[in-house]
Every structure is written in structure tokens, then in C-alpha cells.
Amino acid sequence: MEMIREADPAAPELRALIEANLAHGAVAGPADSDHTFGVEDLCQENVRFWALFDGDVALGCGAYKALPDGSAEVKSVFVSDAARGKGCARKIMSRLAEEARKDGITALVLETGSELCPEYDAARRLYEKLGYAYCGPIFGYQDDANSAFMRLDLGPVPE
């Protein structure tokens, strides 16, 4: 049975997943456009991290980093090859939005590969389906032809 839970990104059972995400980021576009978080980045105090498990097997992960303007940047959303095409990324993204609302986050923002990086086509399609809109560079980034920036405004926590 699949379960998403807040997790320690330094846990041994998550290392392979995070390393696979880093490897994907390293080959999907130019190095200076790769903003993928590794374990150390994911362990920062202002980052919350979740993993999707099937029993003891980690299938995917995602995080967000709180930003000074009250929004949070989505980071390290990644699904293992074995779990692709099963809706895992959608589940993780939905959980991130749910938790962000509970934390009083006003919006989720993200940076992903632009249309110049076809390896990110599926990710951009998912974000669009989830209601993310394209926007200018987000906090901490500059305009980059290899990057697409997106934003999802979060309403109040449903009662």
C-alpha cells in the first residue's frame, strides 16, 4: 500500500532515489542551469521533504523550501523508473500543496527545464494540469532560456 510521509532525506532507503534525481538533472540540461537539490540541500532547516513508499520501498519524493516572501519553492520531485506512469508524481505534488496550505504558504513556485530540455516535457505537462501558470524568474533565480518558471497560488486551508 502506497503512503506519503515526511521523511529524512539522509535516510539510507532514500539515497538511491535522491542520487537518481541528481543524475537526471546533470544530464537533462546545461550544468549552470541545473538547480537539483542533493541530500545536504534537502536537510536545510527551511526545507520540508516527503517520500512516497510502497511498503519499505521508496518510489518517489518531493520537497519545498520556504522563501522570504511567504511562498515556497518546489524541489526534488522525482519518481523512480519502476513507478513512472502510475500517478506518483501527481500524488506527491498534491501532498506538497496540501502541506503548504497547512503551513500558511501563499503560493508554490518552481523552476523546471524549458522546452529546450525535452526531458522535462512530462513534468511541465503535469504542472500545467495541476494549475501551475508560467511566470517570470522566481526568488533566487535569473532569466535562463533553459528554465521554465511556474507558480500555483494557494487559497486558504479548506474547512
Image (cartoon, rainbow, N blue to C red):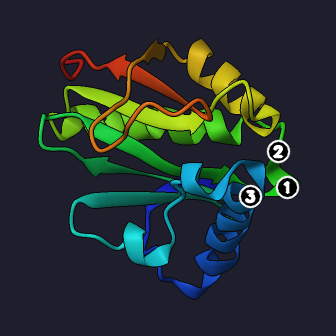
User: In the image, is residue 21 above or below residue 10?
Assistant: above
Q: Does residue 136 appear to the left or right of 83 in the view shown?
A: left
Which mark is in front, 2 or 3?
3
Mark 1 or mark 3: name the one nearer the start of the chain. Answer: 3
Residue at 62% across, 35% down: 146
| SS class, disc 3 | helix
How packed mark 1 is, by other alpha carbons closer than 10 Å (few <14, some 14-19, many 20 or more), is few
Q: Quadrant where the C terminus lies?
A: top left
Amino acid on which the number 3 mark rests in the picture: His
Asked whether residue 55 is in view, the answer is no
Mark 2 or mark 3: name the one nearer the start of the chain. Answer: 3
Residue highlighted by disc 2: 84
Name the spot of residue 124 as percent of width and height, x first: 65, 25
Name the spot of residue 69 as percent of width and height, x first: 12, 34
> Of all residues shown, which one is farthest toward the bottom?
12
Q: Quadrant where the N terminus lies?
A: bottom right
Residue highlighted by disc 1: 81
User: In the image, is residue 7 above or below residue 4?
Assistant: below
Name the spot of residue 11 as percent of width and height, x first: 51, 83
Amino acid on which the number 1 mark rests in the picture: Asp
- Front residue (pair 2, 128): 128
How packed mark 3 is, by other alpha carbons closer than 10 Å (few <14, some 14-19, many 20 or more), is some
Q: Does residue 89 appear to the left or right of 11 in the view shown?
A: right
Which mark is in front, 1 or 3?
3
Q: Spatial distance from mark 1 to mark 3, Cα to Cα?
A: 11 Å
Name the spot of residue 47 as percent of width and height, x first: 30, 59
Q: Spatial distance from mark 2 to mark 3, Cα to Cα?
A: 14 Å
